[in-house]
Image (cartoon, grey):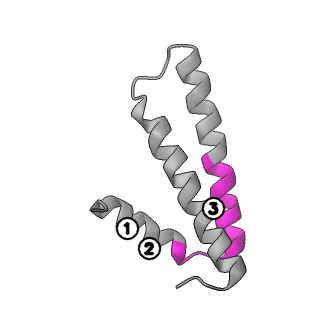
């Protein structure tokens, strides 16, 4: 079962245009880089955030692919 927070996030990214999704993807990748850097220097308190950001990147990429193929809801 998808959590309520995740459903809200999916609705939010599905409503965005392709350019906005690409910007969102870029920001998520930068955040992931920063989180990995913090983790490597032992400055990261919440390591599960890395997992969440990786999942969000995959979700964004999926929506981008769906929009490009014309199968987005």
Q: Nearer the viewer, residue 68 or 47?
A: 68
Q: CA distance from mark 3 to mark 1?
A: 17 Å
Using the image, tell me which numbered label, if any, was put on residue 8. 1
Residue farthest to the top? 41
Per the image, is 49 magenta? no
Query: Tag 1 or tag 3, which sits nearer the N-term?
Result: 1
Query: Tag 3 or tag 2, which sits nearer the N-term?
Result: 2
Q: CA distance from mark 2 to mark 1?
A: 5 Å
Using the image, tell me which numbered label, if any, was put on residue 32. none
Q: Residue at x 51, y 45 (%)?
A: 53
* Callout 2 touching callout 1 (CB < 8 Å): yes
* Callout 2 touching callout 3 (CB < 8 Å): no
Would residue 44 appear left or right of 32 to someone viewing this image?
left
Q: Nearer the viewer, residue 17 or 61?
A: 61
Find residue 73 and report its horizontal and vertical position in percent: 52, 85
26 w.r.t. 13: above or below: above
Determine crowd level at label 3: few under 14, some 14-19, many 20+ residues with C-alpha closer than 10 A.
some
Q: CA distance from mark 2 to mark 3?
A: 14 Å
Using the image, tell me which numbered label, if any, was put on residue 11. 2
Number of dots carrying numbers: 3
The secondary element bearing badge 3 is classed as helix
43 w.r.t. 72: above or below: above
The secondary element bearing badge 1 is classed as helix
Q: Residue at x 63, y 61 (%)?
A: 61
Determine crowd level at label 2: few under 14, some 14-19, many 20+ residues with C-alpha closer than 10 A.
few
Q: Range of the magenta residues?
A: 14-28
The residue that disc 3 covers is 61
Would residue 22 appear left or right of 31 to someone viewing this image?
right
Q: In which quadrant of the rendered view does residue 45 lie?
A: top left
């Amino acid at each position: 079962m998808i959590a309520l927070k995740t459903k809200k996030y999916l609705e939010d990214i599905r409503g965005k245009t392709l350019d906005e999704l690409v910007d969102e993807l870029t920001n998520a990748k930068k955040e992931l880089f920063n989180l990995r850097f913090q983790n490597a220097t032992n400055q990261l308190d919440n390591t599960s955030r890395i997992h969440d950001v990786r999942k969000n990147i995959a979700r964004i990429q999926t929506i981008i692919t769906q929009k490009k193929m014309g199968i987005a809801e």
